[in-house]
């Protein structure tokens, strides 16, 4: 697995992949991980995984060692091939051009034809620090995924979350149940999390205390999810208008800042009450906030599986709580 993002994102990326598309994800070098039981059809919906390949072998991070591993490997395919080499984050002392040329020569000697434009198979050769992983490409992230922006939506408000992050939080929350999951955002704002939920195949449910946000989210979901099932209502996150176990997962971005009252609630009461309601309607949750709410989550009946601190800009750090019902 070729992980996306910066070095600080790797544990986060590995957990997203494990919850939504694979099992036993293990990082082996910067930007690289191995896994078992990959759900290939879910890989294009991941945010922080670029490519997944069927492992051919592992070598030292030199062209000669990579070529030796490929020469000795058992190859169960024929046809045309292209070799794509990467020096992940420029951490290895290696020439990717030399690697593509030499490993391409190995494959030609073994009966393959080279086709750089439309090959039957693509061999990915990834160098990172002192490790090289070789594998046949089997799936990749949607190439157009990163081209969308919150400002493209019919309804936009400053501070809207980037689609890449929203997608990752949806996968962390609902991944084990996808694509047949129902995901609820009780503070849906402009609907960024719900858009990503719908795009990965989940049924999206949203509520917000402000009619303005309900109307805006409805407009955005109609534009991005014209054929999907979704519902948005006006509601208080501490008294959700949904039945027990109405969703598989809850994900929400709590208000930031030190406001004394938000939608008639003190901030602590709002977040704490929302966590209690989330535990009533679902068995998994991801809470994103500008501070730790671990104690409130535990008081609401959640087990904090993981918590990540992700810097956004300046002094803003997002605290990502991955919760499972105790």
Image: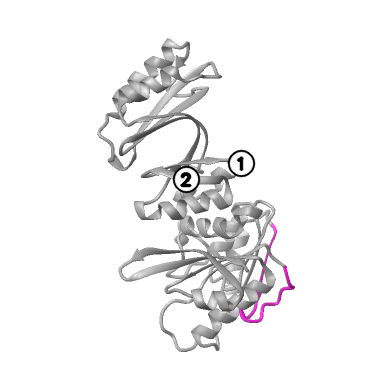
Residue that mark 2 sits on: 26
How busy is the neighbourhood of tag 2: few (under 14 within 10 Å), some, or many (20 plus)? some
- Classify the position of the C terminus by image quarter: bottom right
Badge count = 2
Quick check: 321 left or right of 37? left
Q: Residue at x 67, y 57 (%)?
A: 181
For discs 2 and 1, the disc positioned in front in the rendered view: 2
Q: Image quarter for residue 41? A: top right
Q: Is residue 160 toward the left or the right of residue 170 in the image? A: left
- Is residue 139 in view from this perspective? yes
For the magenta stretch, what is the residue range?
Answer: 229-245
Outermost residue, left side = 93
Q: Main secondary structure of the magenta part?
A: loop
The answer to whether residue 249 is magenta is no
Helix, strand or loop at mark 1: helix
Q: Is residue 29 left or right of residue 232?
A: left
In the picture, measured across the screen, residue 165 lies left or right of residue 231, that is left
Q: Secondary structure at mark 2?
A: strand
> Can you give x and y, in whole percent of width and height, for residue 129 in the image?
30, 39
Q: Earlier in the sequence, mark 2 or mark 1?
A: 2
Residue at image point 47% right, 11% down: 111
Does residue 242 sit above or below 222 in this rendering? Answer: below
Q: Nearer the viewer, residue 195 or 211?
A: 195
Give the image location of residue 232, x and y in percent.
65, 69
Q: Which residue is mark 1?
A: 41
Residue visible at 72% across and 67% down in the picture: 246
Q: CA distance from mark 2 to mark 1?
A: 20 Å
In front: 9, or 141? 9
Report the coloring of the rendering. Answer: one colour
């Amino acid at each position: 697995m070729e992980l996306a993002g910066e070095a600080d994102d790797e544990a986060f990326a590995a957990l997203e992949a494990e919850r939504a598309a694979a099992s036993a994800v293990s990082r082996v070098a910067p930007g690289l991980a191995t896994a078992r039981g990959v759900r290939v059809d879910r890989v294009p919906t991941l945010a922080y995984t670029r490519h997944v390949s069927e492992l051919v072998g592992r070598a030292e991070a030199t062209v000669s060692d990579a070529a030796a591993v490929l020469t000795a490997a058992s190859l169960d395919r024929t046809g045309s091939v292209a070799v794509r080499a990467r020096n992940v984050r420029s951490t290895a002392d290696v020439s990717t051009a030399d690697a593509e040329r030499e490993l391409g020569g190995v494959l030609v000697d073994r009966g393959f034809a080279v086709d750089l434009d439309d090959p039957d198979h693509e061999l990915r050769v990834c160098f990172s620090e002192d490790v090289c992983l070789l594998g046949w490409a089997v799936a990749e992230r949607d190439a157009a995924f990163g081209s969308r922006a919150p400002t493209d939506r019919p309804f936009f408000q400053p501070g809207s979350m980037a689609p890449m992050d929203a997608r990752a939080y949806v996968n962390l929350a609902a991944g084990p149940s996808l694509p047949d999951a129902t995901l609820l955002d009780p503070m849906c704002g402009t609907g960024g999390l719900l858009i990503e939920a719908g795009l990965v195949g989940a049924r999206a449910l949203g509520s917000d205390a402000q009619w303005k946000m309900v109307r805006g989210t409805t407009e955005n979901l109609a534009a991005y999810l014209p054929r999907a099932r979704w519902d948005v209502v006006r509601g208080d996150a501490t008294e959700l208008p949904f039945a027990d176990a109405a969703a598989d997962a809850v994900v929400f971005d709590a208000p930031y800042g030190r406001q004394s009252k938000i939608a008639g609630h003190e901030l602590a009461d709002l977040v704490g009450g929302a966590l209690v309601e989330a535990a009533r309607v679902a068995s998994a949750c991801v809470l994103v906030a500008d501070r730790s709410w671990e104690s409130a989550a535990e008081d609401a009946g959640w087990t904090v599986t993981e918590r990540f601190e992700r810097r956004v800009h300046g002094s803003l750090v997002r605290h990502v709580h991955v919760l499972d019902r105790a």
